[in-house]
Image (cartoon, helix red, strand yellow):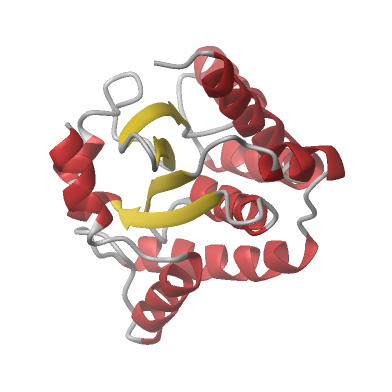
Amino acid sequence: MKSIVAKTLFSTHSYIEYRKLVSDLLSEGKSTGNEQSESLTNYSKLNEARMNRLDKTIAIEEVIAHKLQNLENHYIWLVLSEGWCGDAAQILPVLNKMALSSNKKIDLRIALRDENNDLMNQYLTNGGRAIPKVLIICKEAGIVRADWGPRPTGASELMTNYKRDFGVIDEKIKTDLQLWYLTDKGISVQQELVGIMESIKYNRL
């Protein structure tokens, strides 16, 4: 497992590099990932606009930034993502702002899911390759200490309840999900990730 993570890290992108990669592909009428379609390209365009907005509006709570800056160790947040993923578009800008506010305690790296099947298959959600998936790697130990994703708890419950009640994932729930993210303003992602970081601190190997 450690070798799979190390191999993946060699092909990761910084947040800025990831944004440029997605943008460059869109200029060619493409999206990231093995599958190419008009719908996926359109989702990628929509996500790029969302991320541009979130880069300007997302704010990290002062208490969250303080906790990140006072982490005892240094970490890599390795995120499996794709440009067409709506959840990733909502979450990656938050992760980026958290990493930037951590006083270099966190290094955010992004890998494309479809280029890293071996790693993705180790972190399935209910048997599916759901993204984004965040792997929290302790730099000093070189091991994955925890993982998170693909959504905050509130967003996951929204999707689960809708699928239970209606049996489908349709455009209505996709719209409702985006409204949930808009209202939440990235707070749930911040709180859940910091909670995990604190649990790592107090549960050492």
Q: Position of residue 191 (x, y in %)?
A: 71, 31
- Report whether residue 87 is seen: yes
- Residue under the image location 64 percent in, 38 percent down: 177
In the image, residue 87 sits, relative to residue 150, either above or below, namely below
Q: Is residue 128 left or right of residue 132?
A: left
Q: State the residue lying farthest toward the right.
A: 62
- Report whether residue 155 is seen: no
- Residue under the image location 37 percent in, 61 percent down: 40
**Location of the C terminus (image quadrant):** top left
Q: Is residue 132 left or right of residue 117?
A: right
* Quadrant in the rendering for residue 137: top left
Q: Identify which residue, 147 or 38, lies in the foreground.
A: 147
In the image, residue 88 sits, relative to residue 118, either above or below, namely below
User: How many numbered marks, from 0 up?
Assistant: 0
Q: Identify which residue, 163 or 155, lies in the foreground.
A: 155
Q: Position of residue 43 (x, y in %)?
A: 47, 61
In the image, residue 12 sits, relative to residue 190, either above or below, namely below
Q: Position of residue 4 (x, y in %)?
A: 16, 41
Q: Identify which residue, 108 or 45, lies in the foreground.
A: 108
**Location of the N terminus (image quadrant):** top left
* Quadrant in the rendering for residue 125: top left
Q: Position of residue 106 (x, y in %)?
A: 54, 49
- Residue under the image location 79 percent in, 62 percent down: 57
Q: Is residue 109 left or right of residue 118?
A: right
* Quadrant in the rendering for residue 157: top right
- Residue under the image location 32 percent in, 85 percent down: 28
Q: Identify which residue, 4 or 116, lies in the foreground.
A: 4
